[in-house]
Amino acid sequence: MSFYTALSGLQASQTEMSTISHNLANVSTNGFKKSRTEFADVISSSLSLSPTQMVGSGTVVKANRQQFGQGNLIQSSNTLDLAISGDGFFAVKTDLNAQQVNFTRNGGFQVDNDRYVVDSTGGHLQVYPVDGSGAVVATGLDSAVSLRLPQTSGLAVPTTATALTLQLNANTQPTTADFDRFDPTTYSQSIQNTVYDSNGNALTMTTYLARATTPTTANSNTSTWNAYSFLGDQPLKSGGSDKVALTFDSTNALTAPTATTTFDPVLTTTSKTEQQLSLMIGANTTQLSAPFNVVDRTQNGKAVGQLEGVTVGVDGLVKASFSNGDTKALGQVMLANFSSPEGLRQQGNSYWQASGVSGDPVLGTAGSNGFGKLMSSTIERSNVDITEELVGLIAAQRNFQANAKALDTASQISQTIFNIRS
């Protein structure tokens, strides 16, 4: 019996060393949870055998129990690197049509070619659908969806109206040559304003200012400026005229135009639809003995918003921001917990699946009862402590050596018995 008792000790120690080696091998694996080998003694008992005369039969590996303690949290520069500070698991699906849900603590997510948020193995992060205000509209595994980042937001609104409020320099001298936008000596200032066509393409509307007259004692106390507008390379005309006259009185207050100037429709190279623009010179436009200044410029067009950034709140709400100023709630990260996480079935790649021992997943969101908080731009590392594992490895090696010595001693005793001669 001593042979088998020592053999059980050797096998148990070998299992423990394998477990520790697996822990050490994954010391740098994000979201990895170490395991601990637990043993139980083996006793063959009988009703007829006195309790004081029972001898054990060795040991057996009772469980290779996973330890779900928190790993170290490290900062990263990726907003989609997520970590759970507390209890909970991320839910992921290997592909869009997969029925099986895996659970992980590895929150190193990125965006794939189809704009889905996935982990390093291609698992799609599952979120609850939300409405425009960010409120969850459906719960449960069946309602969860794969998080996908939209490329654009909103619809293009073509520009129809522009407005300028200016502070003109009263000391500017009139120009005598005919206006030529390629000759800076024929105008004094140019103002650029970005406008949009029906497809949301950005175009540049440029307005050139040339002073025509100054107040003199020979005529009146008024002065005039001419404004020439272009959309890209195309001149903007109103009723056949290519200029808008600005008139100031003796107090340097704007007296004309008092209404909006509507230009004739033009066809741009970026759109098949004609575009008609108008220009409003603001009533607060002045003429002073001060440097030229654009007080205000506005336009009513809007481009299609391009995705510029993603944020994830501590409650797991994912929001996208776009170049046109829009923000959109995309979903709320779904978390899962279990009554007995140690019973989860390991799948590799820091994945687990529910089992009969772990119980069914309890679903929720970050910060709610039983779930930890979500941290963005953070990664949870392995919870393996190298020092602790190395000490355990030394102890397991000593146990293995002791059982080997016991096996050798039993062999020597048996050999001695075989060599006894009558």
Image: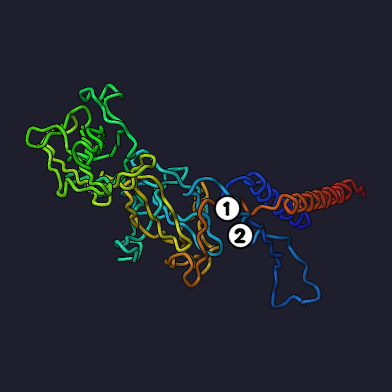
Three-letter amino acid code of the residue under disc 1: Glu
Q: In which quarter of the image is residue 202?
A: top left
Left or right: residue 404 versus residue 222 is: right
Name the residue tied to disc 2: 70
Q: Residue 99 carries which label?
A: none
Please report whichever mark, 1 or 2, sits nearer to the chain's N-terminal start.
2
Crowd band around label 1 with a 10 angstrom C-alpha radius: few (<14), some (14–19), many (20+): many
Left or right: residue 382 versus residue 361 is: right
In what quadrant of the picture does the N terminus appear? bottom right
Name the residue tied to disc 1: 380
Image coords of residue 117 (percent x, y):
40, 47
Q: In this view, does 13 lie above or below 120?
A: below
Q: Image point 87% across, 51% down: which residue?
A: 413
Left or right: residue 162 versus residue 391 is: left
Secondary structure beneath dot 2 equals loop
Q: In this view, does 59 lie above or below 226?
A: below
Labels 1 and 2 touching (C-beta < 8 A): yes
Q: Nearer the viewer, residue 272 or 173?
A: 173
Image coords of residue 186 (percent x, y):
26, 25
**Total numbered labels placed on residues in the image:** 2
Residue that lies at the very extreme toward the front in this rendered image: 217
Q: Image point 16% across, 49% down: which residue?
A: 258
Q: Distance between the residues labelled 1 and 2?
A: 8 Å
Crowd band around label 2 with a 10 angstrom C-alpha radius: few (<14), some (14–19), many (20+): some
Residue that lies at the very extreme toward the left in this rendered image: 239
Q: Is residue 76 above or below residue 71?
A: above
Q: Which of 28 and 82 is in front in this view?
A: 82
Image coords of residue 416 (percent x, y):
89, 48
Secondary structure beneath dot 1 equals strand
Q: Image point 50% across, 65% down: which residue?
A: 358
Left or right: residue 201 versus residue 96 is: left
Three-letter amino acid code of the residue under disc 2: Gln
